Image (spheres, rainbow, N blue to C red):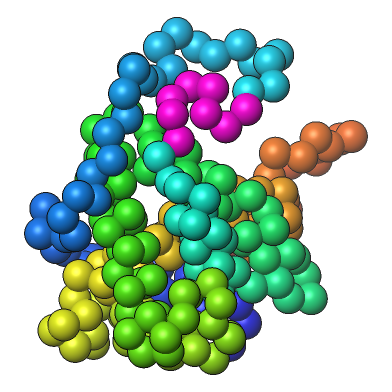
Amino acid sequence: MERREAIKWMLSATAAVAFLDRAAWAEGARPPVKGAAGYGNDPDMLKNYQPGDFWPLVLTEPQRQLVAALCELIIPADATSPSAAALGVPEFINEWVSAPYPGHDQDRVLIVGGLEWLEAEAQRRFGNGFTSLVWGQKSQICDDICYLPKAAPPFHQAAEFFRRFRNLTAGGFYTTAEGMKDIGYVGNVPLASFDGPPPEALAKLGLT
């Protein structure tokens, strides 16, 4: 199965899964975002904003490295595009969980707690941090949490973390130019001329 087909399947298969109780996740996994009220007025579209310009970023350097390793595992590089980690998806996830908006605080609890669980599980199974594991060891851990309906009860909360993290990874990846190209999306491209919809599309709609 091609990567893009696998991603589509995983997203559709998990779309209807109910959220678990995020408040029951790891103690202390709710790092505060102080002095941040959000974008406020429309940002200056001519300014090149840098990460952290709008609100403090909450992920530590070890957490950012762990996020990058997990992004690399979920969407690795292939013949058509770079990996999610190479396209800035870890930075997007850091911005997302740091944002002072409704819902983001819940994702922050889930993601930060999940990263702590992932690191602890790597140490428990292999005696090493997750980023230092070989590909097969990382996959072995993620295989146990990659699909919530089939996850064993001890892994349910970790599987909810992985579901949300995977969706954020896919969302970040497939909104880059390289990700759009990977699935064949050709929108938002200026055309020298436009002759209307193709005859095949009109025929399918019964408009020919």
Measuring from the top left, give residue 153's x and y in whole percent: 13, 84
Left or right of 131: which side holds 56?
left
Measuring from the top left, give residue 170's x and y in whole percent: 51, 60
Q: Does residue 160 appear in the picture of this structure?
A: yes
Q: Which residue is depicted at the point 38% across and 71% down?
A: 119
Provide the major secondary structure of the magenta segment.
Answer: loop
Left or right of 134: which side holds 18?
left
The extreme front residue here reads 127
Give the answer, above or below, for where 58 lies relative to 81: above
Q: Which residue is depicted at the point 51% across and 78% down?
A: 6
The extreme right residue here reads 192
Q: Which residue is depicted at the point 30% across and 69% down?
A: 117
Q: Which residue is depicted at the point 54% across and 22% down?
A: 53
Measuring from the top left, give residue 78's x and y in whole percent: 73, 75
Give the answer, above or below, for where 159 lies relative to 205: below
The quarter of the image holding the N terminus is: bottom right
Measuring from the top left, give residue 134's x and y in whole percent: 58, 86
Left or right of 208: which side holds 82?
right
- Numbered range of the magenta stretch: 50-57
- Residue 21 magenta: no
